[in-house]
Image (cartoon, rainbow, N blue to C red):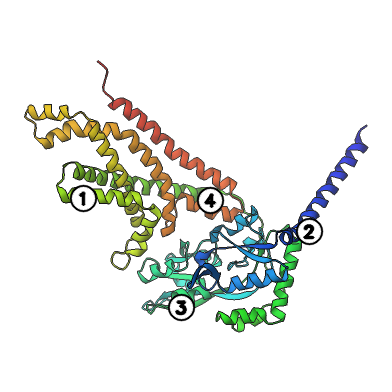
Amino acid sequence: MCTAPRAFATVAALLLATCASVGRAEDSLARVRDRGTLRWGGDVQGGEPYAFQDPNDGAKLVGFEVEIAAAMAQRLGVHADFVQNDWSNLIPSLERGDFDVILNGLEVTPARRGRVAFSRPYYAFTETLVVRRDDAIRDLAELRGQRVGTLSGSLGFDIVSAAGAEVALYEGVEEPYLDLEHGRVRGVVLDNIIAERYGLNRPTLRAAATVGDGVYAVGVRPADTVLLQAVDAAIVAMQQNGELQAILDRWHLWNDRQQSLTATPTATDVPPPSRFTAAQLALFLRGAAFTVLISTLAMLLAISGGLTLSIARRYGGAWPRAFAGAYVELFRGTPLLLQLYVLYYGLAPVLTLRPLTAAIVGLGMNYAAYEAELYRAGMQAVPPGQTEAALSLGMSRALSFRRILLPQALRIALPGIANDFIALLKDSSLVSVITVIELTKQMTITAVDVRGWLVPGLLCAALYLAMSYPLSRLARRLEQRLSPVPA
């Protein structure tokens, strides 16, 4: 009886949705022009020659992609506006609308085609395997099962994974070559631009092989078709009038490969969307196990270190007190991330630590400063009369400390210790910057694989909650058992 009105409503809804979709596509370019700026996302950490701070003017960005962005924006009738973003998260940030386009060494890969519309390519590169000069390695296949460094989310990651090597993931472009020099990885696979500027300028390293090739292109949201057409037209115009070649020449990047760039992006099939599988769940559980291992060992180091520091501050002489005080202020007053960088990279010439060791030591040293203050506060909370009574009964100072003062101080500090352990579990996510793949890093890798952050993010949160909640319950029970029984 109501079939006709319902059918009419359905058709009208479809028409409205189609018009809205077309409107959004048309609005993408109009929105840029109305605003007067083309916002392009990139990461300054990528360094020279992509986009980096001018050595002579820290407020100014330079680089060949800075010049390409400016030339492209000029052809769109607007100004280029750079938006800083972590390179490995450029695509999620584009999807949520933080900027209009990605222009920062974005490699065209089949997996990315499922999420991003690519422009015509503006640069052709090769993937270069770099090894130590005294290493006889000639091909990536020889490094199966060995640690090989690359950037997270890069084409190099796909190549190294397919070769069966153990992937060591980095956030920056210089760190992998530092690790290669000190023997913490066996090889590094990155774009030839990066290899030539950050790896092959080191006398101890050499290029072993070319293991792949690809192109850089501008990334646009798939719905922004009109903006993509305008970007394509701008790149074609720059190629035809020689402006693109002039930019690449200025940065010493022009070579024969650039002449092979076609008018359209390299054809690659779009793979079907990946699903969250049991194998990925196993990787999550492995990452959680690493998190528990690192956190537990680091907390044991923090507890012993913190107790030593608190005793030194309370009972030590002038020098032990000064050292312990300076240690606490230094490690509480500087970021944990900075401490990890200094421990792993800064001290590498004199002390080369493996990633897992550096993670445990770094977290343990940092949290020892906080534990020291907890124990010191716990000791001060115990009435001095109890120690005096123990001494009057003939106990030595060491025995009274061990049997009277320390147990009560630990009971008082126990809730704070449990809270610190929970915080350490979460802070362990920072060790990914020194190539340790723990739970949070595994979440980001899986999110790229399945092209979505919701399921991996919820699972990651659930695992952290499953690890931290029992700790809080255990601390509460211990606190109740250790509390004095009322008379």
* Three-letter code, disc 3: Ala
* Three-letter code, disc 1: Ala
* Three-letter code, disc 4: Gln
Question: Which residue does the image show at 27% across and 43% down from the upper left?
Answer: 372
Q: Position of residue 236 (x, y in %)?
A: 72, 75
Of labels 3 and 2, earlier in sequence is 2
Circle 1 Cα neighbour tier, 10 Å, few/some/many (<14 / 14–19 / ≥20): few
Check disc 3 and report the residue beneath it. Answer: 208
Rendered position, 31 above or below 290: below
Q: Position of residue 224 (x, y in %)?
A: 73, 59
Of labels 1 and 4, earlier in sequence is 4
Name the secondary structure under disc 4: helix
- Where is the N terminus found, in terms of image quarters? top right
Of labels 4 and 2, earlier in sequence is 2
- Comparing 485 with 438, the one in front is 485
Of labels 1 and 2, earlier in sequence is 2
- As measured in the structure, the alpha-carbon distance from the residue carrying label 4 to the one carrying label 2 is 39 Å
Instruction: Please state which of the two labelled residues, at mark 1 or mark 4, is closer to the viewer.
Output: 1
Q: Residue furthest bottom?
A: 256
**In the rendering, which numbered label is found on residue 352?**
none
Instruction: Please state which of the two labelled residues, at mark 3 or mark 2, is closer to the viewer.
Output: 2
Note whether residue 152 is visible: yes
Check disc 2 and report the residue beneath it. Answer: 26
Circle 3 Cα neighbour tier, 10 Å, few/some/many (<14 / 14–19 / ≥20): many
